[in-house]
Image (cartoon, rainbow, N blue to C red):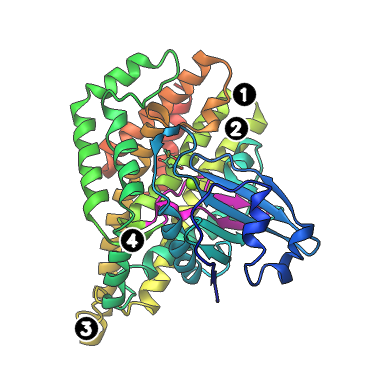
Amino acid sequence: MEVRVLDKRPYEPLDAGTLPRRLAAAPGLAPRIGPAEHWRVREVGDGNLNLVFIVEGPLGAMIAKQALPYARCVGDSWPLSLERSYFEYHALVRLGRRDPGRLPQVHAFDQEQALIVMDYLTPHVILRKSLMAGEVLPHLDRQMGQYLARTLFRGSDFAMETAHRKRDLALFAGNVELCGISEDLIFTDPFCISRRNRVTPGLEEDAAAVRADRELKLAAATLKRKFATCAETLLHGDFHSGSVMVTAQDSRVIDPEFAFYGPMGFDIGAFLGNLLMAYFAKAGHDAEDHARAAYEDWILQLMEGVWSAFEGEFARLWRTERTGMLGLAELFEHGGDAEGAEAALEAVLGDIWRDTLGFAGIEMHRRILGLAHIPEFETIADLPLRAACERRALAMGRRLMLQPGTFPDPRQVSRIARSLRTV
Ligand code: SR1
Ligand code: MG
């Protein structure tokens, strides 16, 4: 894929008026969307950090995403460097190669303007919205499980040539600022007093109990150490249900600006944790009836299915693409011990599963007690009801963080989720 890097001009936040002038010179765009003088541009970003424009022309449409020099959700009191766009661009290219077709294709990258032009995904909608609307997505579990296995396995020393991987690790080690956001917002703030934290009225005592829970803080500290030191593979780094766009048939992964080399379970755990929160939020929106129960069940099946598709695809890659420094075929297959390779696979999957549970649990804490909450809970207008849903999710998260050994598989996660839902 040839990506055009545009000429240098000092950074300026773009708007619907200035964007066409900036992009008109980008080779490759006019043949895809038509001449710039006919473009219609709308800013549609509703995320925490960036500007997002839809650029429509007579021949088609594209997305142009521009980083702002501050965190959009907070304002210019929280300055942020523009470099995240550089890491997002490199992550889009790499993750897209590891699971072809699952991420938007990049058509231009303007580093000076922190601007990425990529496929406009239509009629896709953000997965979080689809789950809130109660839509059943029959292929999502397989597509997301395979995406996770392919990107996590193929970005690791199980598969990659080690010199190449180490160079890449060095590149993404520069994403210090966004890693710092996760280090603070996910692993620290929910467990202490921070001016960034916010809780639903009625949940203050629960938040105080978390801050006083030494066992839980020790688990958070262990997970933070793992996050910061276990440079296992290139992660998406912010893999929640707002980072996936879906139709009934298709799912795409977007927004990997938090990409870095970290533990495999971090991406999987973030995703499963968000599915569990979608599950616990349903009781805050819909009357308790057959339709709601069926959809809640479907969310749990989805969570189970993602792990099972991950496991299946990871095992397939283990058997067919274990060419990296940690592949260790010389210990097993080459020495006539194929069963040893299967035992090693089981051990690796066991480690990833335990990490996944812990990271899912901590994601659930940070979305309820920290800065960045999720619409599933935030849109529950009845505050005592919202607090009750969040309290159940916190109980689930705590159990995942403290007792990962009591969950041999995702079916047990579903069982405990169901038991807490009726509390
Ligand atoms: C200041 S950024 C807050 C959160 O939004 C992003 O999507 C990440 O999840 C981050 O933690
Ligand atoms: Mg994002």
Task: Name above or below for residue 273 compared with residue 121.
Answer: above
Q: Nearer the viewer, mark 4 or mark 2?
A: 4
Are the residues at dot 2 and dot 1 in contact (C-beta closer than 8 Å)? yes
Residue marked by disc 3 = 330
Could you give the CA–CA distance between mark 4 and mark 2, rounded to whole angstroms?
A: 43 Å
- Secondary structure, mark 2, is helix
Residue drawn at 60 percent across, 51 percent down: 245
Task: Name above or below for residue 211 compared with residue 166.
Answer: above
Coordinates of residue 208 in the picture (x, y in percent):
29, 18
Crowding near the residue tagged with mark 2, few <14, some 14–19, many ≥20 C-alpha atoms within 10 Å: some
Q: Nearer the viewer, mark 3 or mark 4?
A: 4
Q: Earlier in the sequence, mark 3 or mark 1?
A: 1
Indicate the quadrant where residue 366 lies: top left
Q: Which residues are magenta?
A: 236-259
Could you give the CA–CA distance between mark 3 and mark 4, rounded to whole angstroms?
A: 30 Å
Coordinates of residue 313 in the picture (x, y in percent):
45, 66
Query: Magenta region, mostly helix, strand or loop?
Result: loop
Residue marked by disc 4 = 172
Q: Earlier in the sequence, mark 3 or mark 4?
A: 4
Residue drawn at 28 percent across, 19 percent down: 209
- Residue 293 is marked as 2
Task: Name above or below for residue 347 compared with residue 383.
Answer: below
Q: Identify residue type, mark 3.
A: Glu
- Secondary structure, mark 1, is loop
Residue marked by disc 1 = 288
Q: Earlier in the sequence, mark 2 or mark 3?
A: 2
Foreground residue among 31 and 269: 31
Indicate the quadrant where residue 100 lies: bottom right
Could you give the CA–CA distance between mark 2 and mark 3, rounded to whole angstroms?
A: 50 Å
Q: Quadrant of the N terminus?
A: bottom right
